[in-house]
Amino acid sequence: MALLTGSVILYIGLLLAGTMRGYTHLHLALLAVRYVIILPALLWCLRSQRGASSGSPLPRIPLGIALLGFAVVTIPLSRISAQGLLNPDESGYSFQARIYRSGRLMAEPLIGASAEVRQTPPELFFENHVLLPRGWFPKFPPGWPLVLSLGYRISAPWLLNPIFGLLQLFAIAAIGVRIFSYETGALAVFFGVLSPFFLVNSIGLMSHAFCALLAVMASLALFRALATGRLRYYAGMFACLAATIQVRPYTGFVLALVLTSAAIWLSRRNRTNLVRVFSVGVLFGVIALACVLLYNHVYTGNSFVSPYAMAAGANTPPELSFRPGRMWQGIRQYAPQAAEESLIGAFPFLYLLAAYALIREKKRRKEVWILAAVYLALVVAYLAHPDGSGVLFGERFHFEGFFALLLLASRGSQLLFQRWRNPRGAVVWILILFAVTQVAQQSAAVAAVVQRVEPYRKVREEIADSGVTGLVFLPDSPGFVAKHFNLNDPDWRHASRIYLVDAEPDLRDEWACRYGVADWTVVTYDPKLKHAALRKSTSNCATLNRVPQ
């Protein structure tokens, strides 16, 4: 035990010593300590105390304390994150939610909009947005923005994801308790609360926390359906899956394929039940598909062309590619980083413990393999997303299946401790040691999040505090990408400020005249001083020809 304690202290010391120099640069060193020093020490410690206990080695983890700690960290961090920008998609979701809150489907187009999306002037181009003469809207499906609009109605959109994260933890515990044991459910929550990957996907304005909640609820409904045979649980599963398709279409499709296949295959011996399950699945599938086709038609004018495709000026979404060569190129380019981040963002040895559950589980083989299929299907499916841009303490495109990994790892832990019959005192001490390492890891993750959102938060605060009006130009600077940060009000004609990307400084006067604005302001961010500054100017429209509005 002393060897394990010493190796954990070494790990924490390395983490704390290097955090100030940039946490992400430590990942490989931290992983080396984990797997070369801590893992052998852990196995030696467990083996040396095999057969020392005849009772259950796992303690009764207090779920209330774990969930309270999660809320205490995520709620304020989510508020800070939402004031800045953790991922460019958040800007699009925010704008679309504010459009829906205003009671419209799209915003009025900015002056200067082009009939061809790819010819949008750089001053008007915001990432993930579609600007056409008939309207202005982000490319995302309506499911999450509609939910997020409710957060804007209470002036707390940042509160939703922490709530959905908490609800997901409750659902994870429910699956663990119903399928395996209380200890398995509680340990899965323990692993989730102390995983940086779970933390960063339960804050801010991204759609993953809500979609993951729908995924875990669909899985819970399936397990209840398999245990009871009641049709209402199958209907609940299909309803959740239909909703995931409106939030994250590709993820929802993959989850629907896995869980629907499991439901049909496991119902194959009961023909009556199989027909009922199939019929309910077809009904919800038709509803989900009809919603997608309607949404496409409203925004693109073509039911078979999505806004994702339109945003790229194409007929099919460019994010996905099923060409083997392109997929292999993406794997070579992004897989090492994704693997590194996934290992560092999860609770230590989560993947090894999950694999152990697959090997050693005897009583609940069916449920274990369904959980494994959920996670692995997302990993494999997103190989068709070769431009990996979702890596932050793990691949965010896999988050909707992370609950399954948590449950598998917690079950693997229980099976390991029971098989080796380790004394409860030793198990408790091991859990405390790893909890301490993860608290330090979470602290470093929080610092990394705050650092990432800081430039955008500073720019927003400087603009709000200054009270500037008129046209506001946002130039790029290290850590700040203007086209990722759309602060415009959907009703921009009646707003006090209009925001444009500062693409061509020589054209500022011209754009001011186009919008009939006498004053314009440039907001810059200095990464060295960590400070945003304003520079005001007045346009000289008398020497320029106005563009008709």
Image (tube, rainbow, N blue to C red):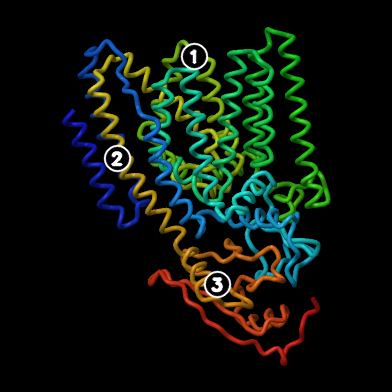
Count neighbours of disc 1 (C-alpha within 10 A) and say few if under 14, some if 14 to 19, many if 20 or more: few
Q: Earlier in the sequence, mark 1 or mark 3?
A: 1
Q: Please state the horizontal and vertical placement of residue 423, each as a whole percent of the image.
A: 24, 18
Nearer the camera: disc 1 or disc 3? 1
Q: Earlier in the sequence, mark 3 or mark 2?
A: 2
Q: Residue type at mark 1? A: Arg
Q: Nearer the viewer, residue 277 or 355?
A: 277
What element does badge 2 sit on?
Answer: helix
Q: Which residue is mark 3?
A: 475
**Which residue is outermost to the front?**
154
Mark 3 near mark 2, Cβ–Cβ under 8 Å? no
Residue 437: image tag: 2
Q: Is residue 116 left or right of residue 176?
A: right
The C terminus - image quarter: bottom right
Disc 1 and disc 2: Cα gap in Å? 31 Å
Residue 282: image tag: none
Disc 1 and disc 3: Cα gap in Å? 56 Å
Q: Residue type at mark 3? A: Pro
The N terminus - image quarter: top left
Q: Residue type at mark 2? A: Thr
Q: Nearer the viewer, residue 289 or 324?
A: 289
Q: Nearer the viewer, residue 274 or 497?
A: 497
Residue 364: image tag: 1
The quadrant where residue 284 appears: top right
Total marks in image: 3
Q: Is residue 461 left or right of residue 37?
A: right
Q: Residue at x 80, y 43 (%)?
A: 294
Q: Please state the horizontal and vertical placement of residue 309, each as a whole percent of the image.
A: 72, 50
Q: Residue at x 53, y 24 (%)?
A: 371
Q: Residue at x 49, y 44 (%)?
A: 162
What element does badge 1 sit on?
Answer: loop
